[in-house]
Image (spheres, rainbow, N blue to C red):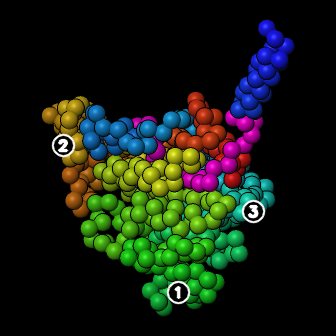
Amino acid sequence: MPSRVRNKIIFLACLLVFAGLGVVIYREWVVQKPFAVILIVADNLAPSHLASARLFAGGADFRFKMESLPHTALGKSRAADYAVADNAAAATSIATGQVVNRGALGLSPEGQTIETLLQAARRAGRSTGLVANTPLTEPAIAAFYARSTDARDAGALALQLLEDDAPDVMLAGGGAQLVPQEQGGARRDGRDLLLEMRQRGFDIVRNKAELESTPGWRAPRTLGIFADGDLAFVEDQSRSPTQPRLADLVRRGIQLLQFNRKGYFLVVYAGLTGRAAELGRGESLLREMRELDEAVATALQYAGEKSLIVVSGLANTGGLRLNAFSFAPDRGIAILGPSAAGVPALTWSTGPGSPGAEPGSTTLEAVAAKTDRPQPVAEDVLVLSTGPGTEQINGFLDLVALNKLLGKRL
């Protein structure tokens, strides 16, 4: 073989080796920073609830869109002072990467302030957004912007929305905490926070039509408040036709935030799954799991295939179970009636035990131990994901690990 040909072959071989090494190094060591980073959190997102909601939504052969996400783990949520976390401590674990006391937001057990993912995203030049079907002052969403030792002090949490590092887009409920009592709100300090936010340059939108007409061609500064408290449960939405659904909020949040060429970070709280559990409304919880899944599907559709999307449970309340057998095609109310032996389809570990008390209820809901309200349950939560770096989400993990994974890609 002529030396010139041999040298060319050696050169090409070396080139291929170096190219292969470059690909390996890029995949394994270079942090890929996607344009869109979306975190979706929900209460009662556990295997038992997902299985029950799946059967209720479509029967034995049905699958939720979130079940198509390629990486899955069981997440452990705990507090520094209790073995079982509330949603404030669980959300703060993700937001800050530290285990905190129950009822604490953005503060270590020693009272020190901890940076949140939302603040880290702003520091990196990203646009930021919060979306929830509960008030913005609910602990699980407030964990990403607020610092407090009392996660239930909604009035004080609302004031922190006025700080200079407030998210660019906020779409939720909770209008009562933003306006004074003399205007029909709940604030006792006389302050009109909606007016103050408008004076700070925010567009204020109050219904679905206004949200859809909000300009998306400029840097976003949008505060959308669509209810005095929670948004309507899915079965009640016909009585609130001007309210957007959670999937609508996710879609518009993405469309408004993607103006920034450096990308965006969006936190979504599907809080009505937890609210249904707090109220002992099992059928509502199953319906809200479907709403959560539609929000996940919307995020996948509008954010694009190369986005980083993490869906995580927080806390579990009540211990809902779907009992007995049903035919494979059965769905909806067909699986919610008592069995031939009189066993209720839905039972709770704890709760008030008032079967059929909710208007429109289609089934009896029994409880094992009667309490004033459903109690926290020790159960791991589901963590589902897609995008760069999410192959690390597998097996069992602490929720604090999600902070590091997301933080590296902001």
Q: Residue at x 73, y 59 (%)?
A: 124
Number of other residues with Cα within 10 Å of mark 3, as a class: few under 14, some 14 to 19, many 20 or more: few
> Which residue does the numbered mark 2 point to in the structure image?
334
Amino acid type, residue under disc 2 in the picture: Ala
Of marks 2 and 3, the one in the foreground: 3
List x then y, in percent, for residue 214: 48, 76
Number of other residues with Cα within 10 Å of mark 2, as a class: few under 14, some 14 to 19, many 20 or more: some
Say whether disc 2 or disc 3 marks the residue closer to the N-terminus.
Answer: 3
Say whether disc 1 or disc 2 marks the residue closer to the N-terminus.
Answer: 1
Q: Residue at x 79, y 8 (%)?
A: 1
Q: Compared to 182, does 285 lie above or below?
A: above
As measured in the structure, the alpha-carbon distance from the residue carrying label 1 to the one carrying label 3 is 33 Å
In the picture provided, is 334 more to the left or to the right than 268? left
Q: Magenta region: which residues?
A: 25-48
> Which residue does the numbered mark 1 point to in the structure image?
180
> Which residue does the numbered mark 3 point to in the structure image?
123
User: Of the numbered discs in the image, which one, if any, rests on residue 2?
Assistant: none
Of marks 1 and 2, the one in the foreground: 2
Work out which residue is located at the far left of the displayed protein and give it. Answer: 340
Q: Nearer the viewer, residue 151 or 395?
A: 395
List x then y, in percent, for residue 354: 29, 54
